[in-house]
Image: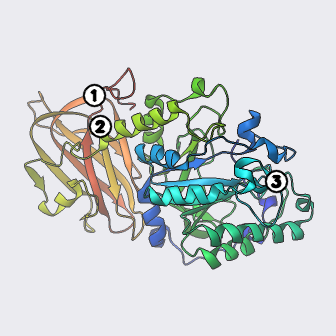
Amino acid sequence: MLHRLLLPGALLACSSLPATAQQNFADIKPSPQQVAWQDLEIGAIIHFGTNTFLDREWGDGTASPSVFNPTHVDTDQWMAAAKSAGIGYVVQVAKHHDGFALWPTAESDYSVKASPWLGGKGDLIRMASDSAHKAGLRFGVYESPWDRHDPRYKDPVAYDTFYLAELTELASGYGPLEEFWLDGAGSTGRTYDFDKIIRNLRTYQSNTLVFGDVGLYRNGDIRWVGTESGRVDFDVWNTVDNSGMLRWRPVEADTPLHRLQWFWHPNSDSTLKTVDELMTTYNETVGRGAQLMLGLAPDRTGNLPAADVKRLAEFGARLQALYGPGKNLLSSAPRVLPAEAAPALSEDHHSAWATGTALPATLTVTLAGPVQLDRFLTMERLEDGQHVEEYAVEAKLSGDTTGQWHELVHAHVIGHKKIDLLPAPVQATAVRLRILAANGPVEMRAFGAYSGKVQNIGAPSMGSPAE
């Protein structure tokens, strides 16, 4: 529901880019803003508007502003719930495809100022922004290019002027924006002046990262995964190629907390995802080098439902129980070779092991005794680019008197973070990471082993490698 591809016909000249023969994948580096954003790992996108009161996902722009009348909006509650799940940033939908603005825009009467909520004096974007910053979360906004209400949409020039004016209000009035979401739904065949739109955004928000699919290539900083399933089905290379132009475009994978529902509906309790489902989503997004964007939906009171708040806290607790401080089974190992690789085992992930240019490069960890594990976590330092092209994780297994190394993982991409789940737990006495191929100097921020056998937090079944 949330978005579809910004197809070539929906773009202007930015979809046609000159080839640059001098570029090489190994040479492309992220901006400092992209590195910091990737470290946040989990975000939330919040849908709340007229659809909430009409039991629908898609608004057609005909709903009366009078239907928007929440009884007790509590954006502090939204942010506290998000933070309990380990979420580091939130993107508030400021205007969905129906065109109804959740701030008192001066450009249209189709907004909260025409609603009965707070006597027409409310500003949901102000409330959400203030609450996010107070909670220590970074804040961003979503403004749909497609507007099914405003009559100016039929005139591209007039509408672009209108859209730019609204964007200026959002970009200049609500503090620093971490992310600006561009959703391509409904825009097939439509031409927008994205060069001008993003130039206008940058006037007020030079550090904001722009989300869009690969069609919004020249102007974007983050790319859509391509589905709303909550999984990444491919090796994530942060550098992507568009007609010979290479750019660093990390992946964001969006999926709602409720199955197939971005907005609140009266049956929301029956569609709420389980903790096990959310853990699978985490492992298949963040654990594959992407960012997880989880959709949250306040109800008609203006609060997140109690079941949602509880589920988010359970999800966060499970993440901490599995991957949190003190859970890396290698961090206290008595012997690490080479000694200079020890920083990769620390849990702060701020230091790194520079492997050098000779390959294969091997990090060997001897454990104090047999340890049960069922997954490995690795992270590259990306400031100088993404370089690992092939790696393996091997272990010496308890009970094997030959002392040989058994290959447990053989894969090709690490990137920001890679979680490799084993089909079944093993008892290991030593493990080693081998970097087999790379396109440049490798720096490993993390190498860890973990066990999915954790306490029963938030769900009836535990201990599966799928967690």
The residue that disc 1 covers is 455
Residue 207 x, y percent position in the rendering: 53, 72
Amino acid, disc 3? Thr
241 and 138: which one is in front?
A: 138
**Label 3's element?**
loop
The amino acid beneath tag 1 is Gln
Count numbered badges in the picture: 3
Contact check, label 3 and label 1, Cβ < 8 Å: no
Q: Tag 2: residue type? A: Ala
Q: Quadrant of the C terminus?
A: top left
Viewed as shown, does residue 317 lie left or right of 425? right
Q: Secondary structure at mark 2?
A: helix
- On the image, the x and y values in percent for residue 241 come to 59, 64
Q: Earlier in the sequence, mark 3 or mark 1?
A: 3
Q: Which mark is residue 188?
A: 3
Q: Quadrant of residue 70?
A: top right
Q: Secondary structure at mark 1?
A: loop
Q: Where does label 2 land, which residue?
A: 321
